[in-house]
């Protein structure tokens, strides 16, 4: 099952100006705030909120004004109720015009300008889908359900997830020429096939070409294209758990088919998947099947312990850089476990085989 839309973090969008014209006003209301309380306008810098402006609440209202001469970085409006205590973050697109912002309800509401209207429309659907999927997920966890009822709830959850992702894609498509579509695309690009989003990438306005998220997305898509099925594998060098320097090609040349398995000791899904990999290795090793594990660990001892605990008997390599793993970057790996199946000539013949699909593919290849 795909990662559910409701599991996406609320902070997935970077916020910036839609156009390079001066003059924005944010007229805000906040339920429950006392006169004299402070609301902040903040940037996101290196993953942290940095205050750039403040406004004092009076009569339940506050106001920010400013210029947007150039495309700016993330903007959040934040308020902390020290008596409750309650902390509110609201995302606002800074663009010319008058923006209205409501804080203190079930969810912030923003409107008044092109990007903010589009973003609010998306969030309204997002929140509704979020609630429906949480309810369905809770049903699947209900111990009183029969197996048949549980499967039906899981089916409905899968269907709702697919519909929700279509909503995301349609929102991106209809807003790709403004920052709402661009930021949603950079946030959700990994959820869609590269072939599907490439036409949208091609429509991104030149004014956003240097946006950090856009640059990273294009680099990721380029790496995916270079390591797609039918392409030749890309070699790299790392160390074994014993500290010996080895090349990926050292292993591929020895086997009829080699599974490059990206994993980590700290990854729960990787550990859950490992019995399937162990089973396939035991069954097909004698027929020319090999595996090389590429660990996204940082702690060498944790890596070595997991190798032992999970009954991993095939070669391992890592640069101990966690998500900065050079091998993972080369193969556009953003989530683990991830696998790449390569034949003895070095051609990639499958990606992201998991569960029974590994054994099914090997049964087809190694008859």
Image (tube, rainbow, N blue to C red):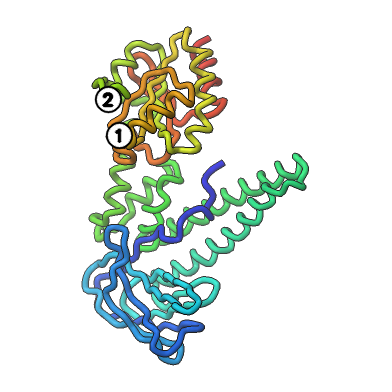
Percent across and percent down for residue 120 are: 47, 69
State whether residue 24 is above or below residue 149: below
Q: Is residue 131 visible?
A: yes
State whether residue 263 is above or below residue 79: above
Q: Going 29% across and 37% down the picture, which residue do you hit?
A: 321
Percent across and percent down for residue 172 are: 43, 57
* Secondary structure of residue under mark 1: loop
Residue 212's disc is none
Q: Going 61% across and 46% down the picture, which residue do you hit?
A: 158
Of label 1 and label 2, which has the lower sequence position? 2
Quarter of the figure with residue 231? top left
**Which residue is label 2 attached to?**
239
Residue 320's disc is 1
For the residues labelled 1 and 2, the Cα–Cα distance comes to: 9 Å
The N terminus sits in image quarter: top right
Q: Is residue 166 visible?
A: no
Q: Nearer the viewer, residue 245 or 10?
A: 245
* Secondary structure of residue under mark 2: strand
Percent across and percent down for residue 246 are: 26, 20
Q: Going 36% across and 53% down the picture, which residue do you hit?
A: 186
Whether tag 1 and tag 2 are in contact, CB under 8 A, the answer is yes
């Amino acid at each position: 099952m795909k990662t559910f839309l409701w599991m996406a973090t609320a902070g997935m969008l970077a916020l910036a100006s839609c156009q390079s014209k001066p003059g924005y006003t944010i007229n805000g209301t906040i339920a429950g705030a006392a006169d004299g309380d402070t609301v902040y306008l903040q940037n996101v810098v290196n993953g942290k909120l940095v205050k750039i402006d403040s406004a004092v609440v009076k009569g339940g209202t506050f106001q920010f004004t400013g210029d947007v001469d150039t495309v700016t970085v993330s903007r959040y409006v934040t308020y902390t109720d020290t008596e409750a205590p309650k902390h509110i973050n609201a995302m606002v697109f800074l663009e010319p015009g008058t923006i209205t912002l409501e804080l203190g309800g079930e969810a912030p509401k923003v409107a008044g300008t092109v990007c903010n209207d589009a973003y609010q429309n998306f969030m309204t659907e997002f929140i509704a889908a979020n609630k429906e999927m949480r309810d369905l997920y809770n049903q699947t966890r209900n111990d009183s359900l029969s197996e048949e009822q549980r499967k039906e709830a899981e089916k409905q959850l899968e269907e709702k997830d697919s519909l929700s992702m279509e909503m995301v894609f349609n929102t991106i498509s209809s807003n790709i020429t403004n920052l709402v579509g661009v930021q949603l695309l950079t946030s959700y690009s990994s959820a869609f096939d590269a072939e599907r989003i490439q036409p949208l990438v091609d429509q991104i306005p030149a004014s956003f070409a240097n946006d950090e998220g856009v640059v990273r997305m294009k680099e990721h898509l380029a790496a995916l294209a270079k390591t797609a099925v039918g392409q030749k594998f890309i070699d790299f060098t790392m160390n074994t758990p014993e500290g010996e320097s080895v090349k990926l090609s050292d292993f591929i040349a020895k086997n009829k088919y080699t599974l490059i398995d990206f994993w980590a000791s700290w990854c729960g899904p990787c550990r859950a998947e490992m019995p399937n990999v162990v089973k396939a290795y035991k069954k097909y090793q004698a027929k020319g099947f090999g595996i090389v594990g590429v660990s996204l660990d940082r702690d060498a001892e944790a890596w070595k312990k997991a190798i032992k605990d999970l009954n991993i008997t095939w070669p391992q390599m890592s640069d101990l850089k966690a998500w900065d793993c050079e091998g993972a970057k080369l193969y556009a790996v953003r989530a683990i476990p991830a696998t790449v199946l390569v034949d003895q000539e070095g051609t990639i013949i499958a990606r992201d085989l998991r569960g029974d699909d590994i054994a099914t593919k090997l049964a087809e290849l190694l008859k």
